[in-house]
Amino acid sequence: MHFRHLAKAIRGHRDVVIPTETVNLVVERLQSANIKDAKARQEHIQGIREVKRQLEALVCPRCGGELKRRKGQRGEFYGCSNYPRCRFTRSV
């Protein structure tokens, strides 16, 4: 979601679950973290696309290890083959 639509989307909900002061605080923090420089924004988007590509190729985005399908107490997941040095996981 683009930042400029976030406040409108939040205000579009009629049920008061989060106090207005908290919503305003969240909006302020998001505004301060917003990337305004076009070049920095493009680099950020490219970084996200690279991580997505790695995950689709079952490559750990933290260390470059292979992501292997594992079974745990909470079900199946992908875990890094370099465990325990790298503890990256993602859901199946």
Image (cartoon, rainbow, N blue to C red):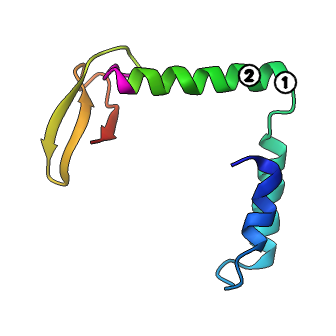
The question of residue 25 being in magenta is answered with: no
In the image, what residue type sits under mark 2?
Gln
* Residue at 78%, 72% in the rendered image: 11
Q: Is mark 2 on a helix, strand or loop?
A: helix
Q: Viewer-proximal residue, 68 or 21?
A: 68
On screen, 19 above or below 56? below
- Circle on res. 38: 1
Q: Is residue 54 above or below residue 18?
A: above
Q: Is residue 42 above or below residue 2?
A: above
Q: Name the residue under label 2.
A: 42
**Which disc, if any, is residue 80?**
none
- Which residue is outermost to the top? 64
Eyeballing the image, is 59 above or below 73? above
Secondary structure mostly taken by the magenta-highlighted segment of the chain:
loop
The answer to whether residue 68 is left or right of residue 46 is: left
Mark 1 surroundings within 10 Å by alpha-carbon count, few (fewer than 14), some (14 through 19), many (20 or more): few
Q: Position of residue 28 (x, y in %)?
A: 84, 56
Residue 65: x %, y % from top left: 30, 15
| Residue 59 belongs to the span the image colors magenta | yes
- The quadrant of the rendering that contains the C terminus is top left
Q: Which residue is drawn at 84% across and 24% down?
A: 38
**Which residue corresponds to the image point at 75% horizontal and 74% vertical from the top-left?**
12
* Mark 2 touches mark 1? (CB < 8 Å): yes
Q: Is mark 1 on a helix, strand or loop?
A: helix
Residue 47 is drawn in which quadrant?
Answer: top right
Question: Which of the two residues, 26 or 36, is positioned nearer the viewer here?
Answer: 36
Mark 2: few/some/many CA within 10 Å (<14, 14-19, 20+) = few
Image coords of residue 20 (percent x, y)? 79, 77
Q: Give the Cα separation between the discs numbered 2 and 1.
A: 6 Å
> What segment carries the magenta color?
56-61
Q: In this view, does 36 lie to the left or right of 13?
A: right
Amino acid on which the number 1 mark rests in the picture: Ala
